[in-house]
Image (cartoon, rainbow, N blue to C red):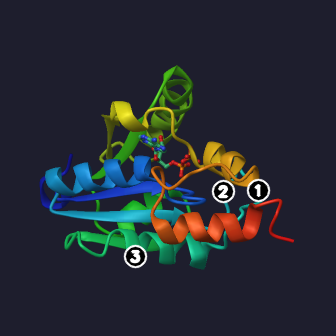
Amino acid sequence: MADQNGGVAICPGSYDPVTYGHLDIIARASRVFDTVVVGVVNQPVRKPTTLFTAQERRDFLLQATEKLANVKVDVFDTLLVDFARKHGAGALVKGLRAISDFEYEFEMNQLNRKLAADIESVYLMASPEYSFLSSSGIKELATFGAEIEDLVPPYVAEALHDRLSRDAK
Ligand code: ADP
């Protein structure tokens, strides 16, 4: 990690939408690094269509992190390492839930390392209470009108129910 920029870390993701699992990782990263930039991928390659626009995903994150003074939110549409350089970041912080996350992250780590060996990737283990939680799982629950209030902030739950609930129309 380069000495001059080790204080800034990026937490990248599609955040479609943000969950308490993401927020747990962001809050923990904010206690380790001086500044955390939550990087919202505009058009995720792995998920060509998103339920919420980049602006909506960003606004949910801004609201959810407003009490964390050293956390910023920014949307990006470039290579992750270029986004990290733009913010002077020395680290990428990712959350790891299970073996499936590990395989993907291992591959991405090798690619990012090849592109930018000076930017270190750091992995935080999911907290047990959120280790089963994913944005896609949340969308599935909301589609069938399940309770999601313990898993996402209230305004996200409301937006999900509005957009997905089969009883809505
Ligand atoms: P998802 O897989 O839920 O669609 P993203 O692509 O937005 O999430 O992931 C952004 C980052 O947050 C990734 O590093 C991912 O591993 C991490 N993450 C997502 N959900 C959780 C969770 N419940 N606990 C810990 N980390 C998580």
Choose mark 1 or mark 3, whichever is in front.
3
Nearer-the-camera pick, 168 or 138: 168
Q: Going from the N terminus, do you reach mark 2 or mark 3 first?
A: 2
Task: Assess whether mark 1 and mark 2 are in contact (beta carbons under 8 angstroms).
Answer: yes
Q: Report the side of 99 relative to 37 (left or right).
A: right
Nearer-the-camera pick, 78 or 75: 75
Task: Kindly identify which residue carries mark 2.
Answer: 44
Task: Kindly identify which residue carries mark 3.
Answer: 63
Secondary structure beneath label 2:
loop
Q: Distance between the residues labelled 2 and 1?
A: 6 Å
Secondary structure beneath label 1:
loop
Q: Report the side of 134 relative to 91 (left or right).
A: right
Mark 2 sits near ligand 1, with its Cβ under 8 Å away: yes
Q: What residue type is labelled 2?
A: Pro
Q: Report the side of 28 relative to 11 (left or right).
A: left
Q: Distance between the residues labelled 2 and 3?
A: 22 Å
* Residue 164 appears in view: yes
Q: What residue type is labelled 1?
A: Pro
Q: Residue 144 carries which label?
A: none
Task: Kindly identify which residue carries mark 1.
Answer: 48
Crowding at mark 2 (Cα within 10 Å: few <14, some 14-19, many 20+): some
Q: Report the side of 129 relative to 44 (left or right).
A: left
The structure residue drawn at horizontal position 38% and vertical position 61%, both measured from the top left corner, is: 84
Mark 1 sits near ligand 1, with its Cβ under 8 Å away: no
